[in-house]
Image (cartoon, rainbow, N blue to C red):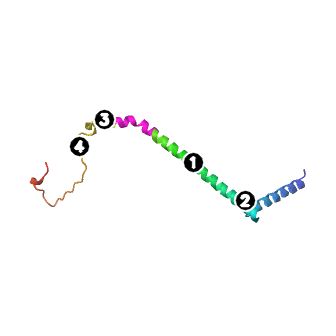
Amino acid sequence: MTANENAHSESTMNQQTRDHFANAGRPATGFLGKVLAFVLSAGLLVLGFIFSLAALAVVAVVGISLAGWLWWKTRAIRKQLRTMPHAEYGGGQIIEGEVVHDADQPTASARLLP
């Protein structure tokens, strides 16, 4: 094959490629083309919805499985914490509250709590 034939072959192939892609972005013409485009678009939309639901179901099953596995693996630790005496927590009772102290007024000794 000579260089001239090779160049002619490449230019013909480039022209065919340009023609093919030039028509690819055009909207469908005619009634049948529009109906076909609508049906294909609706079908792709339904398929995408189905696959997204399937993916959501897989994620939910994996998440529930991992949560169940973690719950099962920590059951011994939870049982140990329930049976642990309070002395190991630091002893005594835990009382939550808020203390407000006004330093300007002296406290009366008769009003102190035991």
Q: Secondary structure at mark 4?
A: loop
Check residue 55 in the rendering and tell me which mark sits there, or answer none.
1
Mark pair 2, 4: CA separation: 76 Å
Q: Which residues are magenta?
A: 69-80
Q: Which residue is mark 2?
A: 36
Q: Amino acid at mark 3?
A: Thr
Q: Are marks 4 and 1 in contact (CB under 8 Å)?
A: no
Mark pair 3, 4: CA separation: 16 Å
Q: Amino acid at mark 2?
A: Leu
Magenta span has 38?
A: no
Mark pair 3, 1: CA separation: 42 Å
Q: Which residue is mark 3?
A: 83
Check residue 93 in the rendering and tell me which mark sits there, or answer none.
4
Q: Are marks 3 and 4 in contact (CB under 8 Å)?
A: no
* Residue for point 58% across, 47% down: 54
* Residue for point 44% across, 39% down: 70
